[in-house]
Amino acid sequence: MTRGYFLNVELDYLKRVVFLVFCLAAFWNPSLQAEVKTKELDDIFVSKELLLKKENIKKDWEKDLFLGIFSGGFWPSVTRTSSSTVYPSAKVEHSEGYSQSQSGYFGGFYLGYDFKQAALPLCGDKKWKAIPAVAVVFNYGQISTSGFSYESQSLHPSYSNGSNQSFIPEIAAVVNFSNSSPFVPFVGFTLGAALSWLVDPSAINFQGKELLAPDQTAFGSAFTSKFIAGLAFRIFPHCDVLIAYTTRVIAPMDFKLEPSPLTGASTVISHSGWYQDFEGWGAIQYNFWP
């Protein structure tokens, strides 16, 4: 036991001596010092690069975001309409006609993302690039409508009017044509849903009798899509102004209305055919990149 104890002490002492000799050699040997310092600097640079890379990965997605608000006006085309009046006896009367919406207004906001890493060069010098983008768009619009319809058993028309309010959430796919100038053309299309409310509708037959109950609101919904073409230009750092022309199409939708008690009917179903309008609008867009 005593011999083993002294052997362990000697080994421990020997390790300390070897470590001391290595430290002295490193102090007196410049090349060894340089090698140690170089290794330390390399480790520092590598750590810094990894940190910056992680920071860039974290923030890169933010740089491609954009946010905008927009407003404009639209001019609808003539829409074919029809209605069905249902009586308690199961009798149904049909009428067909056309509605002419007046010019209306709309506005909303959008949040989108530019896929700059997917940019496609359009020419050899790469001055023109096609950059895809997607956005979530929220629209609100309002118009006044008026029209006429012919009942199946009468040659005289009935007249109708009301206010149509719509909330339209949709997804937009856009291609920006980036170039060396501050003006960037873009085209795109949207897909969404038109959620519409027909507010305080009125229908008067050729005898001057009101066919609908007053102060009512009817709801209808349908798929919608539109084509977009416009131009964006930079006015301030991070800030663009957009002007655009669009045309929207809304699929047919039905509104269930309450008839006037004087008619003796139980229900009126108003059917709106394919709708199309023509829109002009402007937007202010904030970009999260310079």
Image (cartoon, rainbow, N blue to C red):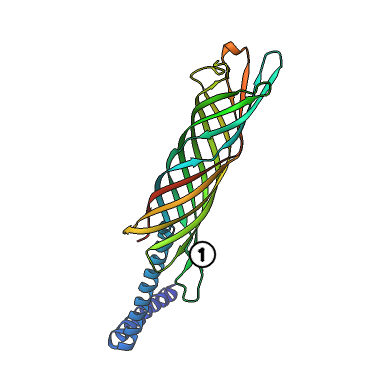
| Numbered circles on residues, count | 1
Q: Position of residue 277 (x, y in %)?
A: 52, 42
Q: Position of residue 204 (x, y in %)?
A: 55, 20
Q: Residue furthest left?
A: 28
Q: Residues within 10 Å of mark 1 (few under 14, many from 20)?
A: few
Q: Nearer the viewer, residue 47 or 103?
A: 103
Q: Nearer the viewer, residue 139 or 279?
A: 279
Q: Position of residue 126 (x, y in %)?
A: 47, 73
Q: Nearer the viewer, residue 39 or 158?
A: 158
Q: Is residue 210 above or below residue 248?
A: above
On the picture, is 44 further left or further right than 230? left
Which quadrant would the C terminus be assigned to in this image?
Answer: bottom left
Question: At label 1, which amino acid type do we have?
Answer: Ala
Which quadrant would the N terminus be assigned to in this image?
Answer: bottom left
Name the image quarter holding residue 178.
bottom left
Q: Is residue 38 above or below residue 117?
A: below
Q: Position of residue 19 (x, y in %)?
A: 35, 80
Residue at the spot x=52%, y=44% of the render?
170
Question: What residue is disc 1 on?
Answer: 118
Q: Residue furthest right?
A: 90
SS under mark 1:
helix
Q: Is residue 12 above or below residue 169?
A: below
Residue at the spot x=71%, y=16% of the render?
90
